Image (cartoon, grey):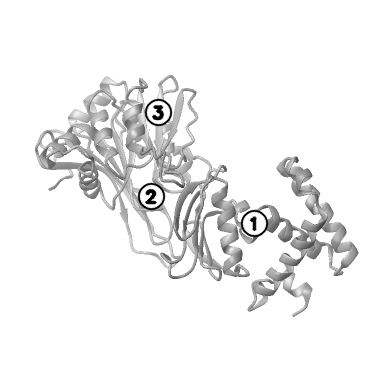
Amino acid sequence: MSLRARIAAPEESGAGREDGHLVASYRAKLLEEIDLAEMSSLAAAERRARLERVLGHIISREGPVLSTAERAQLIRRVVDEALGLGILEPLLEDASITEIMVNGPDQIFVERGGRVEQLPLRFASHEQLMQTIERIVSTVNRRVDESNPMVDARLPSGERVNVIIPPLSLTGATLTIRRFPRSFTLQEMITFGSLDEPMLLLLAGLVQARFNIIVSGATGTGKTTLLNALSGLIPPHERIITIEDSAELQLQQAHVIRLEARPPNVEGKGHISIRDLVRNSLRMRPDRIVVGEVRGGESLDMLQAMSTGHDGSLATVHANSAEDALMRLQTLASMSEVEVPFEALHDQINSAVDVLVQLTRHADGARKITEIALLESHGRDPYRITTVCRFDARPMSADGRIHGHFQYFPLPRRVADRLYLANQPVPQAYGVSTDTEQLAVRHAN
């Protein structure tokens, strides 16, 4: 295969390896002609521009003869390899890609619009993939090797990165980069079909009336996106403390304190957990506490905060239904080092949680709020969940899409009264239940 063909189509069989050697060759020549000390003193944009100029001179001097587009592509790939993340660099610049998944040097998948697709790209070798991984983790002062084969971190640019290498990964070094799109408002999410206007009005009223809200869903359902949108409904004068494992929330209010957990360093020291941050936040006079995701013993501290004066707090949890979310919270709270009887945890959840918002990612990739439910039980009573809105999905149509409609049910009188006292209207689509009206109530043990 010709040089020109290899530059234009590195994905063809065998070409990726040859092209990788070509890029490595020019990268070596580039390094021979630059002053590394001088380069380190330049800003990132100036450094890239300088490398592109020097490499352009090398190609003009030594060949090969290429078209303008082919020359630009070769320069881009070599400089990306020298400064950035090589073949991953263009993927990170593609705004339509939300997740990059590297399964060893020969398989690269991405998620676009909720759908996963394999790209015709590959790393030249396992060593090149490891160099890319080491470059990524070094930006957050972490290392990855056989003694530390797993890394979970957030890049300075905001992406969440997970790395796992052999011997734990049998398919070779695995890299997952999760990118977070810009924050969306609930109004914008209506245009995506994630919810509709009556749901927006209800959620806005619940946030303004300081209901404690748990956003529940499986991985990739959009929990953080919805949490961020709900946070945007908090009045601007309130003091908000966000607590996250990897900072993703982008609140626009003026009085926001962002806290992020810290993993242990290479010596295994310095770990600051979500639970440590939740405990500390209670000493910071918060009006609202927003926890990006509860996944351990911090659930107990969060529930205690919700039930002892910190109304209007928000959090997410991994669960497949509203009932599962309650069970998950109870299980997580029991993981605390404080031994609390399961019955007491049950009581704590009944007094702390007001609203459960369930998210689902459908087979066509669409993410929707599939249920808004109210927790109506008290004390040691079995969990009693009242559904006030749900998405009624129909089977996938011929166009490969999931269609359906949102259903609304009357709000319990207690909830309507609480909205009224907070000067929040009851959306007309719902109404208020009477004593003789049947509510969509179910129990979870």
Q: Quadrant of the N terminus?
A: bottom right
Task: Specify the amino acid type for callout 3.
Answer: Ile
Q: Residues within 10 Å of mark 1 (few under 14, many from 20)?
A: some
Relative to residue 433, is residue 38 depicted above or below? below
Q: What residue lies at 77% left-to-right and 59% top-to-bottom?
A: 75
Q: Is residue 202 visible?
A: no
Instruction: Tell whether 74 sits left or right of 409.
Output: right
Label 2 sits on residue: 368
Instruction: In this rendered view, identify the residue nearer to me: 364 or 39.
Output: 39
Disc 1 secondary structure class: helix
Instruction: Quote the CA–CA distance across marks 3 and 2.
Output: 27 Å
Q: Name the quadrant containing residue 307.
A: top left
* Residue that lies at the very extreme toward the front in this rendered image: 267
Circle 3 or circle 2, nearest the eye: 3
Task: Specify the amino acid type for callout 2.
Answer: Lys
Dot placed on the residue nearer the N-terminal end, 1 or 2: 1
Instruction: Tell whether 317 sits left or right of 236.
Output: left
